[in-house]
Amino acid sequence: MGARGFVLAAAAVVAAALSTGTASAAEKEPTGPVQPNIIAAALYSVAQPTIAPPGANDWDCKPSAAHPNPVLLSNGTTANAYENWANLSQRLADAGYCVFAGNFGGSPGAFLQTVGPVAGTAGQLATFGDKILKATGAAKLDIVGHSQGGMNPRYWIKNLGGATKIGKLIGLSPSNYGTSLYGLLTAIQAIPPARDLVGVACAACNEQSTGSAFLTELNAGGDTVPGIDYTVIQTRYDDVVTPYPNAFLKPAPNVKNIVLQDLCGLDFTDHLGIPYDPIAQREVLNALDPATAVPPKCVFVPPVIS
């Protein structure tokens, strides 16, 4: 889900004025700089919302023997690719992965993305995934997704042939079982005019409400499939997917549910911060390549107060 849309409402207004059509893909797309957090990345992307995150979208990249699967980064609700991944993308590229990210589920060139119906966003993601497989020659790809971006690939897996194309799905605070948003979203669903108004701007928001028809269908018959390794990385301080265990998938041999605070009690990252959190990033790398897994370093970094 995308609470950051409210935090950055003013930026969104500016973005609407500045938005242009999506740039055509070159062999290596223009990328922006590494950012320390999602707010800095969002502000940078206001003027150029289609810029790719650093280290991503080199269409000449060929996967190595050590990392044969390219990595597709899947955005959270309201987030564009740069905003969501302007740190982790470079870390993955530096680790030797072919990394790709795009904008789906929003108006082409707009600042706000991943707001349309989840099935449509998943379909666009699947098309992008096919493009990645064709360009790289890989047999499968791995997905790292934040929030809705960790949940909507499961629609691709269940309904769009993704089960044979995806090796690993790693979710950072994914909305697998939706959210009540501390009761607010649940209350909105009970008031049809309010629900319909939210749906006009963000169909995906209603579909991620706990117990929605979309999530009920998605999770029916089991929330995972054999042959794909699933990892959920969640924080107890998630303030968007609430209650926080709604992120977790049902126990299975190919499922690993991780709570960051079980690894480091001093990690206070929230929903928006988790893609930029070094401990969460370390666990992403560990999930992508378990054979070279390294325990994360638990170091307290005091918040910056300006």
Image (cartoon, grey):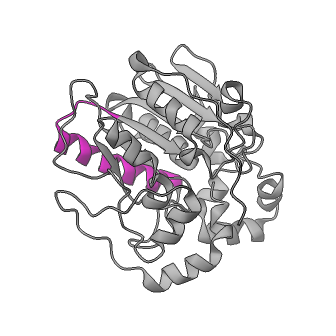
In this picture, residue 57 sits left or right of residue 274: left
Tally of numbered tags:
0
Type of secondary structure dominating the magenta stretch: helix
Image position of 117 with respect to 174: above or below: below
For this rendering, which residue is in front, 195 or 146? 146
Indicate whether 2 appears above or below 6: above
Q: In which quarter of the image is residue 52?
A: bottom left
Q: Residue at x 53, y 71 (%)?
A: 43
The foreground one among 206 and 175 is: 175
Is residue 157 highlighted in magenta?
A: no
Is 96 positioned to the left or the right of 303 in the image? left
Question: Which residue is at the front of the view, 278 or 180?
Answer: 278
Residue 46 visible somewhere in the drawing: yes
Quadrant where the C terminus lies?
Answer: bottom right
Magenta residues (range) = 118-141
Q: Percent x, y for residue 223?
A: 57, 29
- Would you say residue 111 is visible in this rendering? no
Q: Residue furthest top?
A: 253
x then y, percent, for residue 154 = 49, 37
Image quarter where the N terminus lies is bottom right
Taking the spot 58% from the left edge, 47% from the top edge, the residue there is: 147
Q: Which residue is drawn at 61% across and 71% down?
A: 200
- Residue 241 to residue 254: above or below: below
Q: Is residue 125 magenta?
A: yes
